[in-house]
Amino acid sequence: MGLPRVAVIGCGNWGKNLVRNFHHLGALSTVCDADEKRLEHMAREHKGITTTSDYQSVLDDKAVSAIVIATPSDTHFNLARQALLAGKHVYVEKPLARDVAHADELDELATERNLVLMVGHLLLYHPAVNCLKDLIASGELGDLLFVRSDRMNFNMGRRDWSVLWDLAPHDISMMSYLLDCDSPQVSRVGGWDTLGDGLVDVAYLDLSFPQGERTIPGQVRNSWIDPQKVVRLTVNGTKKTAVLNDTQQEDKLALHSQTPDGRMVVEYPYYPSGEPLQIECEHFLQSIMRGERPRTDANNAYNVVRVLSDVEKRLSSRPGHKPQPHQTVTTR
């Protein structure tokens, strides 16, 4: 089987990175977007590709075997469903859908038609994350005590109903992957609509990750109103604490431990270099060529959607219900 021909739907802030990577890999055929100026820019940047604002024409194109969706999250389900019904393999940026029933339906469609369905949980392809997963599995950190993921920035784009739909899929998918837990449970939720515009822009989740007879507690903290970008994972163990700081250019992963005399020791484990998005795009193409389920398949995506759907209900942030500024919802 030759290299699949890919069409990227949506070439905005993140979609343009997918366009770049699939073009670099020699698989890009078409870019589709409603914005003609964006399409003109893509055509100048990437010679030889087709551009269109007509999604149906992409679905009808027999030369296109795979669709990559990088549009607002509330459009993911319908676009992915149409692509699967048209017989196309599908990669969908996170989250896969906004409803667990929709996630199930997409998985069933892909399975029935023997098509690859992959979700863009980028951090599962991050070399430093995979290095940390190996260290946890080897016992390097000892017994795990607590895990926390902080993801904050300043964002006025606000296409999602809540900061959690925008940022937390990364945190939940990464933490579940590292802890080998496919059923994290939410114990407490807090959210604030600081601007009074109906959008939760600061939030936290307290989670529990069952591991056999043990349960590891964890927390996710997200913000759209923090001017200092924070992308940090902390995993506390009885022997060592790992800190993965993805805003750093080098030495993103550090292991902290204390000697018997109280001296702090910091180690920087080796992990291979590589752009996580390129690794992820390569994995999608390889999954198609090999006929295998990808690492971030619909099963992987389901629990992220399940958790966030539950959280959304608790925060009462659906359209038609405007939360009060500084509203907090706590559920134990």
Image (spheres, helix red, strand yellow):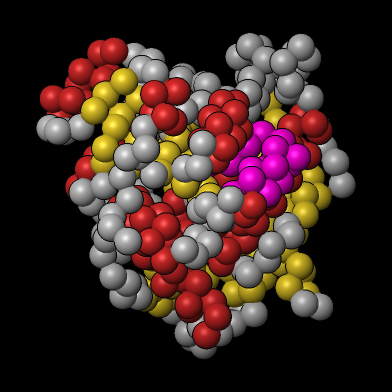
Q: Position of residue 94 (x, y in %)?
A: 53, 41
Q: Tell me what residue is drawn at x 35 percent, y 75 percent.
A: 269
Indicate whether residue 45 is drawn in magenta.
no
Task: Classify residue 243 as left or right of residue 40.
Answer: right
Who is closer to the viewer here, 78 or 119? Answer: 78
Which residues lie in the magenta part? 94-110
Identify the image quadrant of residue 137.
bottom right
Q: Tell me what residue is drawn at x 80 percent, y 31 percent.
A: 313
Taking the image as drawn, is residue 89 in sight? yes
Q: Tell me what residue is drawn at x 22 percent, y 43 percent.
A: 23
Q: Position of residue 114 (x, y in %)?
A: 56, 55
Identify the image quadrant of residue 168.
top right
Taking the image as drawn, is residue 243 in sight? no
Who is closer to the viewer here, 43 or 16? Answer: 43
Who is closer to the viewer here, 130 or 269? Answer: 130
Identify the image quadrant of residue 228.
top left
User: Is residue 85 shown above or below 216?
Assistant: above
Q: Position of residue 305 (x, y in %)?
A: 68, 43
The residue at the far right in this view is: 332
Q: Position of residue 39 (x, y in %)?
A: 26, 20
The residue at the far bottom in this view is: 260
User: Is residue 289 shown above or below 19?
Assistant: below
- Quadrant of image for the N terminus: bottom left
What is the tally of numbered marks visible in this picture?
0
Indicate whether residue 105 is drawn in magenta.
yes
Q: Please identify the dominant SS of the magenta region.
A: helix
Q: Tell me what residue is drawn at x 27 percent, y 19 percent.
A: 38
Who is closer to the viewer here, 261 or 106? Answer: 106
Task: Classify residue 105 as left or right of residue 16.
Answer: right
